[in-house]
Image: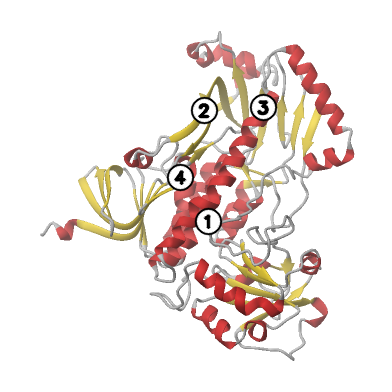
Amino acid sequence: MTAKSLVTEVDVLIVGAGPVGLTLANTLGGHGVRTLVAEERPTLIDYPRGVGLDDESLRTFQSIGLIEQVLPHTTPDQIMRFVDADRRLLAEIAPVDTSFGWPKRNGFVQPLVDAELLAGLERFETVEVAWSSAMATCVDTGSRVTVELDTPAGPRLISAAYVVGCDGGRSATRKQLGVSFEGTTSPTRWLVVDIATDPLGHPNIEVAADPARPNVSVSIAHGIRRFEFMIHDHESDSRAADPAFVAGLLGAFVPYPERLDIIRQRLYTHHSRIAGRFRCGRILLAGDAAHLMPVWQGQGYNSGIRDAANLGWKLAAVVTGRARDSLLDSYDQERRAHARAMIDLSTLVGRVISPTDRRVAAVRDALVRAAAAIPPVKNYVLGMRFKPMPRYDRGAVVHAHSRSPRSAVGTLFVQPRVDTREHTGVLLDDVLGPWFAVLCWNNQPRAVLGESEFARWKALGAKFIAARPHTQLHWAGHDDPDVTVVGDRTGALKRWFDGHRDSVLFLRPDRCIAGATIAQSAPELSADLLRALALTPGGNDAAGPVLRLAQPAS
């Protein structure tokens, strides 16, 4: 047996089988990309970590065809209440908007959702998961990346076109690259206690900004309750681990703390850090390997899923020959600013709730209550409109007009329920499919684009959508075998277009609006987009992605 035969060749090696790596692997598997996931642990982590999913993450799980598997492990529309030392309400976050198709706040059991992501990989012959396989070395040769994995059977050599480090805050991939991890680590310690058979049973989240000891109580799905307590500087780690001390903390909430079924408890600190680069040649970083943030907005997990959604389609496009390597530069350009904004928001919220000086806390409480008495401010917080949303000024987007605040380019498109001629009440993304789409309001895409540009997008495997008022759904006057007609079942699409000047949208696989324009300018914008996105019609898989999402029955 030659040395060459001992080398496993793949398109993408993912280091780390956490939620980010598994989501990315599902995306790549759906496009037929040869993918190896290498995890140093022998199995998935089986205890709760992240406890909140947002609408963007659920939309990503929908895109990889696993939403029905994930939903049973979630609690939708979870409310977060901030209270003072006397448990009086300071502020409440209870968004009801579902413009992206899913509730904005959802409790969930991470190990069970991660298990569904892992099981989803069984659909793909091109994806392998290697357990107990730690990355020992990683060398970018320019044309490939050579990796040595330490396994129970001995060293395993991997040759990959690209490597993505999804291996957590202590990322071996990032350390191999020598990339900085800039930011701060809070000296304040927190004790987290996860309990089975929820001793309280009530839903939602309560964050107590109590100067005596800030604390958090979280309802997780399937009867799990999480408590978090700030540990004071004078309290040692060994004291925080003492069962009697922990029982004393929990005794403030339950009458019989000694009867609790504790799943686990641990101390941790909050990090606010971001990698100096998300891409170094053929090696990229995602999730906690690229950024860490405090838990206060529940965005660490969700930010990692955003990384996977942003990077997955770009890697698939490059390795299947539909795009040039330069497309991957847009990953850092697009994700860095948003990850930074999430870190800053989470850090700010932590500072607001954590003061242990009673005078400072009293001033804070007064200011928060005064702000909450102003209806616009209250609605701003209640609807979670303070959450930074992705908005890309640079990257895989083209701004045909000036970058005005009203421009929709670089933002996520809405996902209402629509009707097709075959199905009713379908979520829009399930009609758009897992790849590019060109969507026109009140127009026929072929007529708007012209035959030449239409053919170029068709060669890329794009889906063409003619969106109409519901009354026109079954009118056959502009029928085209390459165009899907969508009826605006709820009126949400008309309302969206009514608020924007553009009527032709070029949608990326992650449902970001890559370009938008009025109908007459669509051919020119189309040509600009194909250049800017480094797209090359054809490639190794011109027929389009392997993964097809099942359509709901009418």
Amino acid residing under circle 3: Val
Seen from the viewer's position, the closer of residues 88 and 140 is 140
Of pointers 4 and 1, the one earlier in the residue sequence: 4
Task: Compute the Cα span from label 2 to label 3.
Answer: 23 Å
Residue under label 3, please give it: 216
Report the quarter where the N terminus lies. Answer: bottom left
Q: Which residue is mark 4?
A: 18
Tell me: residue 470, above or below residue 195. below
Give the quarter of the image for residue 49. Answer: top right
- Which circle's residue, 3 or 4, is located before the other in the chain? 4
Q: Nearer the viewer, mark 4 or mark 1?
A: 1
Per the image, the residue denoted by label 1 is 310
What residue do we see at 80% from left, 76% from top? 469
Dot 2 or dot 1: first in sequence order is 2
Identify which residue is drawn at 57% across, 26% down: 193
Residue 167 placement (x, y as % from top left) = 41, 42
Pick out the residue farthest to the left.
1
N-terminal-most mark, 2 or 3: 2
Residue that appears at 80% across and 42% down: 380
Q: Amino acid at mark 4?
A: Gly
User: Dot 4 surroundings within 10 Å: few (below 14), some, or many (20 or more)?
Assistant: many
Please name the residue that numbered disc 2 is placed on: 184
Lateral position of residue 95 relative to residue 28, left or right: right
Q: Secondary structure at mark 4?
A: loop
